Image (spheres, helix red, strand yellow):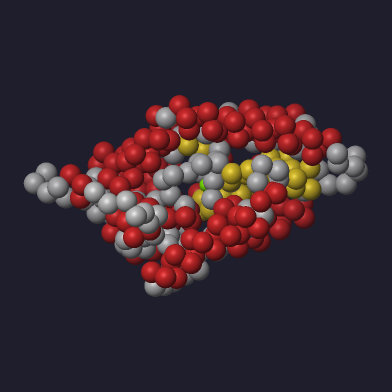
Amino acid sequence: MTTRLSKLRPAVLGLAFGLTLASCAVTRAPTASTSPAAHPTAPWLYADLYLQTAAEYEAICLQTYNWAAERLKAKIAALPKVGRIPAVVMDLDETVIDNGGYQSFLHREGLTNSSALWEIWEKDHFHEVLLVPGAKGFIETAESLGAAVVYISNRTATFQEYTVATLKNLGLSLVGIDRRLLLRDGPSDKTGRRKKADETFRVVMWVGDNLRDFSDAFAVPEPYGTEAERFRALEDRKDKVRENASRWGDDWIVLPNPVYGEWTKPIASDPRKFLRPTAMKK
Ligand SMILES: [Mg+2]
């Protein structure tokens, strides 16, 4: 579960089949004679449609980035005028970059995610990615305030040139990008790269769509264990969110992602078991 891909669509395989991404392979959808519900990406269709079609999603992103810009202005204004350059650390996929086209491909072709397919998307289709609403405006505001925008992503360092091409294609600044782009060349845990960014710059804000973009304390322990342990893992993550309640909307800014992420891991084997109980019956 170390690749960006393993983060990208664990839901597709994980929830549909209870498999881990580490073991996932590209699979064809069932033939037309089987139930449409057996389509491998079917459980995620509406999650993707929410990102791709819901005006509410766009409004949430704009709301988030508008607020983040106001917080950033206040934070930078309060900094001493000497010392390291202030910075904002941002995740890339589904924080700055919208990869909806890749999801459309999976749905339409009846495929599940694989590192091989993702690599094709990353290398040959970088011109198809879009911006998460509000991200570019926020980045430009940060830069106008004199802050460096540092990208910490689990896209692989092997394909750095394609990630740089993606940013360029989106019209984002590449000034000093070698110091500002920290891709994965080892574990998916971003702790070391966060520390590096904090030592190079004075980081005042972190932005991501997965809570592991803020702290690896939000990682779900592997293996995911028994059903009871999975319930506990879900509650533990919420407890940690509550423990850090004052940071959300302050220096931790989170974007919504209903399609994939750390949150999907505990519920992978049987998602219905994780629905909230109710006394209501038909
Ligand atoms: Mg992300």
User: Between 136 and 257, which is closer to the camera in this rendering?
Assistant: 257
**Left or right placement of residue 162 versus residue 240 in this view:** left
Q: Name the residue rendered at 72%, 32% in the picture.
A: 70
State which quadrant residue 148 falls in.
top right
**Left or right placement of residue 224 versus residue 273 in this view:** right
Q: Where is residue 248 in the image (x, y as percent from the top left)?
A: 65, 46
Image: 129 above or below 254: above
> In this view, which residue lies farthest toward the left?
33
Q: Name the residue rendered at 42%, 62% in the picture.
A: 266
**Left or right placement of residue 207 versus residue 170 in this view:** right
Image: 57 above or below 1: above
Q: Name the residue rendered at 77%, 33% in the picture.
A: 73
Q: Residue 185: in sight, yes or no?
A: no
Q: Name the residue rendered at 88%, 46% in the picture.
A: 83
User: Between 77 and 121, which is closer to the camera in this rendering?
Assistant: 77
Quadrant occupied by the N terminus: bottom left
Q: Where is residue 67 in the image (x, y as percent from the top left)?
A: 66, 33
* Number of numbered discs visible in the structure rendering: 0
User: Between 91 and 57, which is closer to the camera in this rendering?
Assistant: 57
Q: Position of residue 15 (x, y in %)?
A: 33, 56
Q: Position of residue 236 (x, y in %)?
A: 54, 63
Q: Residue 99: in sight, yes or no?
A: yes
